[in-house]
Amino acid sequence: MDLHLLDAEPTVEERAAVDAFLGAPASGWEGGERRARDAHTAAGGHAARGRRHLLLPAFHAVQSRVGWISEGALNYIAERLTVPPAEAYGVATFYALLSTVPRPRRVLHVCDDIACRCKGAAELCAELERTVGPAYHHGPEGDHHAIPEDGAVWLRSPCLGLCDQAPAALATVAGEAPVERLFGNVTTSQAAQVLSGNLTPSEAPHPRLPQAGDPSLRLLRRVDSIDPESLDSYRANGGYQALRRAFELGPEGVIREVSDAKLMGRGGAAFPTGRKWDAVGRQPVRPHYLICNADESEPGTFKDRVLMEGDPYSLVEAMTIAAYATGCEQGFIYLRGEYPLAHERLQRAIDTARARGLLGRDISGQPFHFDIEIRKGGGAYICGEETAIFNSIEGFRGEPRNKPPFPVQAGVFGKPTVINNVETLVNVLEILRIGGPAYAAIGTESSTGPRLFCLSGHVVRPGVYEVPFGATLRQLIDMAGGVPAGRSIQAILLGGAAGGFVRPDELDIPLTFEGARAAGTTLGSGVIMVFDDTVDMVDILLRIAAFFRDESCGQCVPCRVGTVRQEEALHRIHAGRSQGGVPGEVALLEEIGLAMKDASICGLGQTAYAAVESAVKRLHLFNGASGR
Amino acid sequence: MFGAGGGTSSYREAEETDVIFLWGANARENHPIFFHHVLKGVHRGAKLYVMDPRRTSSAQWADEWLGLNVGSDIALANAMAREIIHAGLANEAFIRRSTTGFDAYAKAVERYTLAYAEQETGVPADVIQRAAHTYARADRAMICWTLGITEHHNAVDNVLSLINLALLTGHVGRYGSGVNPLRGQNNVQGGGDMGAIPNRLVGFQDWTKDSAIRQKFEKAWGVTLKPTYGKNLTDMFEAMEHGELKAVYAIGENPAQSEADQGRAERLLAGLDHLVVQDIFLTRTGEFAHVVLPATSSWCEAEGTVTNSERRVQRLRKALEPPGDARDDMWIICQLAKRLGHDWGSPSAEDVWNEVRSLAPIFAGMSYARLEREGGLQWPCYDENHPGELFLHSRLWKDPPEGMLAPFSVTEHDPPLERPDDEYPFQLTTGRRLDSYNTGVQTGGYTSPLRRGETLDMSPEDAERLSLVEGDPVRITSRRGSVVAPVRIDKSLRSGLVFMTLHFQDQVKTNILTVDYTDPKSGTAEFKACAVRVEPIRAGTRAERVAALRDPDTSA
């Protein structure tokens, strides 16, 4: 490699953080002391370049130890992993959770996204600005030098996936024993205490399932009912029966059951899972990889978190079955970085399963080997896009790839890859429990099985709800207790920021793939966010527009430019400075939106206009307004 | 190889081979086009091994770098051979059927144990062993080398020791397997092809040994050819020294700066009765000339052909009118002939090429029309229907093999003649960088963001020991002369090894330092190894140090 390393040296602590993760350098050529042997030989090449996938974890190691990644630390990591420092910098700056400018060790990420806005996030942030100071601006031009290293700062954050306990915040304290806590129902005084170091929020068991104990539950039946950390508790409640069944069926049999069940992907794209598995299983190229997409970052989505925190073994078992069916020996859980509790519980589940022979070699005495590694995301929404995950795991910027080739042909590391969402995988347990045909009988003809919905915003009992496909929007909102007394619904956001709004007179839309399609909307990741009549919808649109502008990876022009122009037009409307009147701005938004939809590489750009479009066309938000 | 001076493989094969040995070659910088093909192979999964005293930018791409001591190549190659033989990895069928001299060779390498090789080369035995096994076990493997092998007093033996490895394992004459000297410029190969070497006429034909060849040329040219070889450059300087050679006609060559022991070269050139220099710029050699003939730049101001490292003959086309009085080389030569009493007319480049085709069988099939149509052709190409050869020596795999069997050669480790001692404790090795050619005649005229001027590159350990920081001026002294250059600290060097280029001869005459011990078989000097002393210039002020750098003292 043509490495042009910098002169910057890592500090002792940074070096220790990297070495603790990568091990001590094997030679002077990797950043260690020059030894006699180094004068006459060096190993590198394929073996060295093959370690690039450790780049993001190495950055996390420094970030969580020191609180930010200095030039010296970056240089040392680049040298250790044979990655050009410029590329390493490109990767480090891609992720919001990593900082390449000085940042104190104690940081509070306060969610100011749309669900939390319904529950006072804006007021919380305003209070913090007043009492603690402005949010830390972490651009290289920011006034960061003024902040002492042992101080603390707060940042505004996009959705943290704790919408049922809004407003939410994530506290991180870097150090030898780093602390990360995601906590809800945040008050100003709590936030201030966390920042002053007087309070470390305890990691309360997050899942608070409104339906807990309901015997009709299939996917959620163990959540809040069993000890999520105990394999025995999991087994005592039906755990690992599905894997046993899978071994009876054989790989083809498992795929047949999944195909018969007509399981569709729950991540948003609704692709038939059986077809995906079959395509990978047939690929002669080896190895095959399995990835669980747990980068649940769509604003308003938290169902996967609830599954992972409340029933982590179910995901481990489901992945084991998927790997068995498709011939994978290595699996990754690409977990969003803001889910420390899910991380901890999944890691424990994986370690325990491995210790009990349920992962590793010869699983349950079968000639089948499989193991799982958790890869922690870095706070990038785009990394929920499947090909962006591949790049992220491989140690590149998490930019989506062009398709084809499709993941089933050439996914992570260029090999055939199965990539499924958490909820999709957990459905496989139910399919093997009751059989494909029985599963297919649940729901409707084209939307089979149970489905999880994330209710948030102005409902009485926010949370994750499981219903068979076919329930209407009204039924779901009623299950969540409807809007608080005395209020009325103004709009409902379906499917998250990439989804669309519907009106209160459209509550009878059946929540099925075909029903949503017929109504011209989408289920997306199962978000149902309710806005009552007190909400300024333009403010919500602005937050969504800012979200897409912030999260665009910048790789392709329509999205990189379009998301900025879209936000600007909305700002002009909101501030009453429309150019050519509101209709002119609306026409401009439409034009920008079409360009993004038609010409963006990936789903982010293609859906960045969706919410705005629905606000214009369904909510008629700008009708009659002549510029405020 | 084995008679014809050219690499056996095509570029394409480097992309599709499994193991590549870059031996004494920093192709990343000096053969960047070829290295792109290597990188394609590497990205496809090929293993790359680099043998070089420095951990060069090429070596940084390698799966393993074998940082041998300067001039210990034969010890390394022979130890690998012994290891291959002892591990039972020699290709016995190929050896038996297609080679000669194996028994003597096997006996000769027997003393090159891994331990001995480690002691002589510095490369750990396990690394040598692994490289040997990787090469021998590969389905396809190629060895590529350049001046790190040939700029030694035993250059030919160095080359032969590498060819031995290919014969031992059968890695020659098959697609993806071969032995390849890389050519540093677009037409180094073409120079040899056209007979611009003292011991072969065009198409590598030896007129001294084969009377049919001699008669063919005598008939075509209407002259009588003396049955003796000419002199190579080193011989010529010897002859100048002895007063035998009094007049020199130098075409596109700058020996005043490219020869080792530059002080001697300049003295001899200055002492000639008559020196004619034909070049595109006024070179240092031109400054000694009695007559300077300004020539055209062949890649843009003249018609003709070039041959690249994969033996591909390609057309060159004139794009520009030459400036001023510059004239096409061919025109100059024809005019010279005319004034010396031989009217050769005014042939076009194609006329001359057709004469080449009529006299050299390996080019016979390459008409201009075909070269144009087929994007160049690889020699040998015997007739208009011959497609040219992708790789050479497939004949060795015929049963029985066709033509001459491939001979093993016994070569023995023979370290550089001038080795570091107490008085001159550093080993100086010289080389080239990405953005410059040789003495800078072709490259000094444009700026490059990479160009830093001449430096003495030194390991961090030595710099620390001498209390030097980057940019400090030092005096570098060999037994032949002394120059001043700033220090550049370079981790790719180990303690005791220093490096310079010859790109900035007008500022720092590196070749004043080098030694002109030459290989009697090839005439190449040992540019890669001489012993020097490095002394910090401890001028009192920074201004004085800068002055020392600006006005380097160049005499010993």
Image: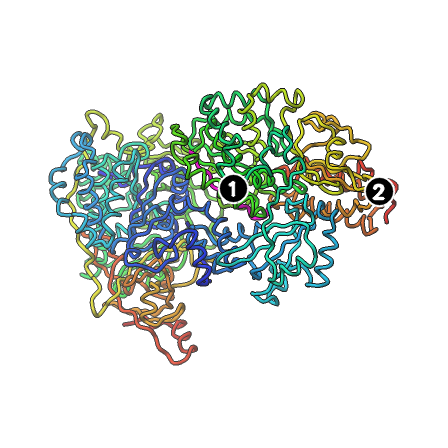
Q: CA distance from mark 2 to mark 1?
A: 42 Å
The span shown in magenta is A370-380
Q: Which disc, if any, is residue B260?
A: none
Q: Secondary structure at mark 1?
A: loop
Q: Residues within 10 Å of mark 1 (few under 14, many from 20)?
A: many
Q: Is residue B324 left or right of residue B140?
A: right
Q: Residues within 10 Å of mark 2 (few under 14, many from 20)?
A: few
Q: Nearest the camera: A14 or A72?
A: A14
Q: How is the image coloured?
A: rainbow
Q: Is residue A377 magenta?
A: yes
Q: Nearest the camera: B372 or A510?
A: A510
- Residue under pointer 1: A229
Q: Which disc, if any, is residue A486?
A: 2
Question: Mark 2 or mark 1, which is nearer to you?
Answer: 1
Q: Amino acid at mark 1?
A: Glu
Could you tell me which residue is drawn at 14 percent across and 41 percent down?
A: B105
